[in-house]
Image (spheres, grey):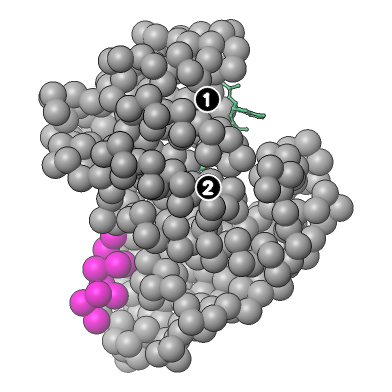
Amino acid sequence: MSDYVNWGILATGSIAATFAEALHQVDSADLAATSANLLAVASRTQASADKFGKRWNVPRCYDSYAALAHDPDVDVVYIATPHPYHYDNAKLCLEAGKHVLCEKPLTLNGKQSAELIALAQRNKLFFMEAVWMRYIPAIAKLREWVAEGVLGEIVAVSADFNFHRPFDPNHRLYNRELGGGALLDLGIYPLSLTTMLLGFPASVESHATIGTTGVDESVGLLLRYASGAVGMLTCGLRSNRPIEATIAGTRGYVKLPDFFLRPDHLILHLNGEEPQTHAIPYRGNGYPHEIAEVHACLQSGALESAIMPHAETQQMMELMDQLRAEWGVVYPEE
Ligand SMILES: NC(=O)c1ccc[n+]([C@@H]2O[C@H](COP(=O)([O-])OP(=O)(O)OC[C@H]3O[C@@H](n4cnc5c(N)ncnc54)[C@H](OP(=O)(O)O)[C@@H]3O)[C@@H](O)[C@H]2O)c1
C-alpha cells in the first residue's frame, strides 16, 4: 500500500457530503499513517457529480457509478446510496476489484449481505459496513470499560433513537421502494451498541407500528440474554425524544447522552460514588475515526475490521430480517 489511499465516493447525497468533509479531516487529525486522497465521485447525473466535486475539491467527477468502479486509480469506494441500492452498488465495486466501505445497513436483507461478504472474501477485498459509531472514541472507551468489568456484570442496556420526521411518502425514511422504516435506518444503532457490548441475544420480543406506506414507523424491542441481562431499545420516526443510552451493571452505570449524535463524553455512576464526567472528544466531524480504521486495515492487509466484523454484520442483517418478517414489512426488491 502506498502512502496515500485514493477514495471514490459513490452518490452525492447527505451522508456522502459528511464523508467528503471527513476525508479532508483525516490528515489534519493525524489519525491514520496513510493520507486520504478524495480522488473521484460518481452520481447518476454529471451535474450533481460536478457540483459535489467543486464543493469538495474532487478531481474526477463521473456521471455513472460504473465509471467510478472502473477507475483504475481508485483504491476504495464509499457507498452512500439508499439501502436498496447497496447490494448492486457494492457488487459492482467488488467485482471491479475495489475495496468497499458501504453505508449501513449493509444491504436490505441477510441473503444479500451473505452474498456480498462471500464475494469480497473470494476476491480478497476489504469490505466493511460503515457503522461509524463503533469508532468514536467515547464508544471505544465504553467498550473497554465493559470488557474490563468497570461496571461489574452487565444487567441492562437501554438505548433510544427516535426523532419526529414529518410524514412524507416520498422521503426515503417512509418510502418502501427506498428501504424506508425506522429499524433499518435508526434501530440498527441501538441494536449495534447492545450487541457490541453483550453479543446477540437469546431471544427478542418486539412491537412495531406500521404506517400507511407499509414501513415500521415506531419500534420497541426487548432483548433477552442467557445471563439474565436485557436490552430495552426503541427507534422511530414519530416523536422527538432524548437520543440516549444507559449501560447498567452490578457496580454502576454509564450514561451516554447523544449516543447517536456523536458522543464526546461519558458519565460514569459507580455505586455509592459521585458521578464522574469523562470528556472523550472525537476528531473532525467524527467520521475520520472510521476512515482511519479502513486505512489501518488496508495497510495491514486485513479484509475485515475486528471492530465491525463480517459475522456481526451478517448476524445483524438476519436479526432484522426476523423482526421485519414478524411485522410483515417486506421491500419490493425482496
Ligand atoms: N452513517 C451515518 O451517519 C448515516 C447517516 C445518514 C444516512 N446513512 C445511510 O446512508 C445512506 C444514504 O443516506 P442519505 O441520508 O445520504 O440519503 P440521501 O441524502 O437521500 O442521498 C442518497 C443518494 O443516493 C443516490 N441515489 C441513487 N439512487 C437513488 C434513488 N433511487 N433515490 C434517491 N437517491 C438515489 C443519490 O445520489 P446521486 O444522485 O448522486 O446518484 C442520492 O443523493 C442510507 O443507506 C443511510 O442509511 C448513514
Disc assigned to residue 112? 2
Label 2 beta carbon less than 8 Å to ligand 1:
no
Give how far across and how far down residue 169 sits, in percent: 81, 41
Asked if residue 251 shows in the view, the reply is: yes
Give how far across and how far down residue 139 sits, in percent: 34, 60
Q: What type is the residue that disc 1 sits on?
A: Ala
Q: Residue furthest front?
A: 122
Choose between 87 and 149: the one closer to the eye: 87
Asked if residue 286 shows in the view, the reply is: no
The residue wearing badge 1 is 11
Choose between 294 and 313: the one closer to the eye: 313
The answer to whether residue 68 is above or below residue 161 is above
Residue 333 position by quadrant? top right
Crowding near the residue tagged with mark 1, few <14, some 14–19, many ≥20 C-alpha atoms within 10 Å: many
Highlighted magenta segment, given as a residue range: 140-149
The answer to whether residue 273 is above or below residue 211 is below
- Left or right of residue 55: residue 233: right
Residue name at image x 26 percent, y 32 percent:
26
Disc on the earlier residue, 1 or 2:
1
Magenta stretch encompasses residue 142: yes
Crowding near the residue tagged with mark 2, few <14, some 14–19, many ≥20 C-alpha atoms within 10 Å: some
Which of discs 1 and 2 lies nearer the camera? The answer is: 2
Label 1 beta carbon less than 8 Å to ligand 1:
yes
